[in-house]
Structures are given as structure tokens and as C-alpha cells.
Image: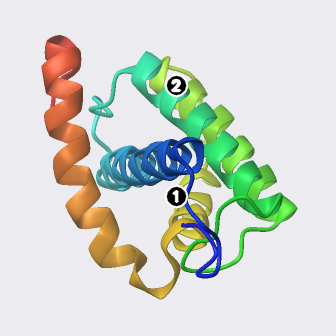
Amino acid sequence: MPHPDQILTEDLEDLLDWATMTKLYAVGYIRIVADAIERGDADLQVDPVAWENTLLAVEGAMVEQVRGRLHGPRPITVEDVERMRRLGGLGSAALSGGERSPELCPLALQCMESLFGADWKRASREAAFYARALNQEFHPGSGT
């Protein structure tokens, strides 16, 4: 979100729309993968390419917030960006059939909270619904 006193230009409005959707889908994918790992599912239900693209995009949106171009429900720090980067790597490894690090689920919770603040649980449930629908539309064989 822009700062309340900031005038929205068309470029800033586009950036805001992109950042909002990026955060929504990132939290959805994070929730889907973390829930599947906690249940011990063989299929993590997210296409690896969708995961990677979305996590890289949300990292970019978070950097824009650190730089002050965007504002969200809570301030984003460089440490938040580094945690998201770490989560992206751990998730990519798990989705490609590699190790499912025990760090992934606790890190997922931290990352969801960094994006949506105290309301992350509700936001992540809703976002998972939309992420599943998007994932199924573009990656029908992914299991969701």
C-alpha cells in the first residue's frame, strides 16, 4: 500500500496492484505447501515453477516496501526479505523432490505473518483458495 499522504500515479497504482496480488498468491502457495508438509502428503500441490515465480515476485514486492515505495499492514525489514528468500529455496527443494527441511513450516508461518501481520491466518486461508484455483488453471496436472 502507498503511504496515506502519497499521491497515486499510474505507475505507483500498477505497482500497488502487482504487490497486492503477489502477496496474496505467495501466502496462498506458502500455506498450501506448509499444510501438505505438516500432513506428510507426498504431493505438495503446487507447481514448482509457480512457486518459484511467485516467491521471487513477493521478494521484489517486499524490497519495494523496505525502500519505502509501498507500505503494508506491518513494516517489512531486510530480515523479512532474507527469510522469504530462504523459504523460497527450501520450498523449491521440497517441490522438486528434495529434502523437506524441518525449518520450512516454522519459517512459512513467520513469512506469512511478515506479509499480513496479525491477520495472517485468515488471509492465508483465503489466499490458499485463490492460489489453488490459479494453480489448477495454469498447471492442471499439479494435484490441486
From the image, tell me which residue sits under label 1.
Answer: 105
Give the mark nearer the N terminus: 1 vs 2. 2
Looking at the image, which is closer to me, 60 or 12?
12
Quarter of the image holding residue 29?
A: top left
Rendering coords of residue 101 (x, y %): 62, 44
Q: Where 37 falls versus 120 (above or below)?
A: above
Looking at the image, which is closer to me, 59 or 65?
65
Residue at coordinates 55% horizontally, 60% vertically from top-left? 8
- Mark 2 is surrounded, within 10 Å at the Cα level, by few (under 14), some (14 to 19) or many (20 or more) other residues, namely some
- Secondary element under disc 1, as helix, strand or loop, is helix
Rendering coords of residue 37 (x, y %): 39, 47
From the image, tell me which residue sits under label 2.
Answer: 53
State the scheme by which the image is colored. Answer: rainbow
Residue at coordinates 35% horizontally, 21% vertically from top-left? 47
Residue at coordinates 52% horizontally, 80% vertically from top-left? 117
- Secondary element under disc 2, as helix, strand or loop, is helix
Q: For marks 1 and 2, give the CA distance.
A: 20 Å
The amino acid marked with disc number 2 is: Asn
Q: Is residue 89 left or right of residue 137?
A: right
Which mark lies nearer to you, 1 or 2? 2
Residue at coordinates 54% horizontally, 73% vertically from top-left? 113
Q: Is residue 94 left or right of residue 80?
A: left
- Mark 1 is surrounded, within 10 Å at the Cα level, by few (under 14), some (14 to 19) or many (20 or more) other residues, namely many
User: Which quarter of the rendered picture does the C terminus lie within?
Assistant: top left
Q: Which residue lies furthest to the bottom in this view?
A: 118
Quarter of the image holding residue 45?
A: top left
Q: Where 37 falls versus 108 (above or below)?
A: above
